[in-house]
Image (spheres, rainbow, N blue to C red):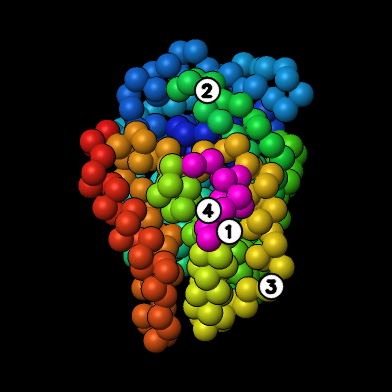
């Protein structure tokens, strides 16, 4: 199977290494020509969970070059980078599939403007990864990669079934979900509660549980988002609240991606996370004042930081 991974960040590099070791033809498309050149010449160094490391030969090219032909294109870039990819994705073969792994929501609608519905799949990844350099990645924790169609389909998709099996052979726990919406919403709630609060107060994840007033705000954010999700047809169970608290505890020392973006002067994904909840709430006539406040505060912090 020919797989093109668009994005040379932590998730993109981890999946590239694992899939290559699993027997796939893999090509990485990176933002910078420098990273692509180094990957092409030096390969990718994978640091595994057991502490060992393994060099993995890798083909790569910069995003400025034409996309190679592939059976499946895996999008491992931020929401804020999607717009630049749309022209190239509109020209892929009708037999190819696209799997999008973005945080937040709204990317399905944007991609569906240029990709046929039966070609488009969305995914939620919980595998832990950390990019050590442009040509080195560390696998930091086991998780699951859940995949489902943008629009529900009755017939099987042989190509995607083969890809799921390839992931499993590559050491990645993969699940196929016919209704991926509830998975996306549950991940959205995790990001909507943890990311903006840690970015606003500039603290690691675990700090949120130490301040009663912050914990109360998290609960209010959860209730607002759950009401919107339920109205949108995705029921959020009460145990999702405990799941979020557990994630805060288990990742207590972690720095959220939104805080990392602010510190490096990059645009955050606030619009695809809390902004999506606010806009969907308006669509259904549901007020989300806490999410709107966080959205505005993070946008202000973006403007206060020097641009990267």
Q: Earlier in the sequence, mark 1 or mark 2?
A: 2
**Mark 3, residue position:** 238
* Secondary structure mainly formed by the magenta segment: helix
Q: Nearer the viewer, residue 219 or 260?
A: 219
Give, as a single range, the part of the protein colored magenta.
203-214
Q: Earlier in the sequence, mark 4 or mark 3?
A: 4
Q: Residue at x 53, y 41 (%)?
A: 204
Local crowd size for mark 3, using a 10 Å CA cut-off: few (<14), some (14–19), many (≥20): few
Q: Is residue 239 magenta?
A: no
**Mark 4, residue position:** 194
Disc 1 to disc 4, how far (Cα)? Answer: 15 Å
Disc 2 to disc 3, how far (Cα)? Answer: 37 Å
Q: Nearer the viewer, residue 133 or 300?
A: 300
**Mark 2, residue position:** 132
Q: Earlier in the sequence, mark 2 or mark 3?
A: 2
Disc 1 to disc 3, how far (Cα)? Answer: 20 Å
Local crowd size for mark 2, using a 10 Å CA cut-off: few (<14), some (14–19), many (≥20): some
Check the image and report above or below for 268 versus 138: below
């Amino acid at each position: 199977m020919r797989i093109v991974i668009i994005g040379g960040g932590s998730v993109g590099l981890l999946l590239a290494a694992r899939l290559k070791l699993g027997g796939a033809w893999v090509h990485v498309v990176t933002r910078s020509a420098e990273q692509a050149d180094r990957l092409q010449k030096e390969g990718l160094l994978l640091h595994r969970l057991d502490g060992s490391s393994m060099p993995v030969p890798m083909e790569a090219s910069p995003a400025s070059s034409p996309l190679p032909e592939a059976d499946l294109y895996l999008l491992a870039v931020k929401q804020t980078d999607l717009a630049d990819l749309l022209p190239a994705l509109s020209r892929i073969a009708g037999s190819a599939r696209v799997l999008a792994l973005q945080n937040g929501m709204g990317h399905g609608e944007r991609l569906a403007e240029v990709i046929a519905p039966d070609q488009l799949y969305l995914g939620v990844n919980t595998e832990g990864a950390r990019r050590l350099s442009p040509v080195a990645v560390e696998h930091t924790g086991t998780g699951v990669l859940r995949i489902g169609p943008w629009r529900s389909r009755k017939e099987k998709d042989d190509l995607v079934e083969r890809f799921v099996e390839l992931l499993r052979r590559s050491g990645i726990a993969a699940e196929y979900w016919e209704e991926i919406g509830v998975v996306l919403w549950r991940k959205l709630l995790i990001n909507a509660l943890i990311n903006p609060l840690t970015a606003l107060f500039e603290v690691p994840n675990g700090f949120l549980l130490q301040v009663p007033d912050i914990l109360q705000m998290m609960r209010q954010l959860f209730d607002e988002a759950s009401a919107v999700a339920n109205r949108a047809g995705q029921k959020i169970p009460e145990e999702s609240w405990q799941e979020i608290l557990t994630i805060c505890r288990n990742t207590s020392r972690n720095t959220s991606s939104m805080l990392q973006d602010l510190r490096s002067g990059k645009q955050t994904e606030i619009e695809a996370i809390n902004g999506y909840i606010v806009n969907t709430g308006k669509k259904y006539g549901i007020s989300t004042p806490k999410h709107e406040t966080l959205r505005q505060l993070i946008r202000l912090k973006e403007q206060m930081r020097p641009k990267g």
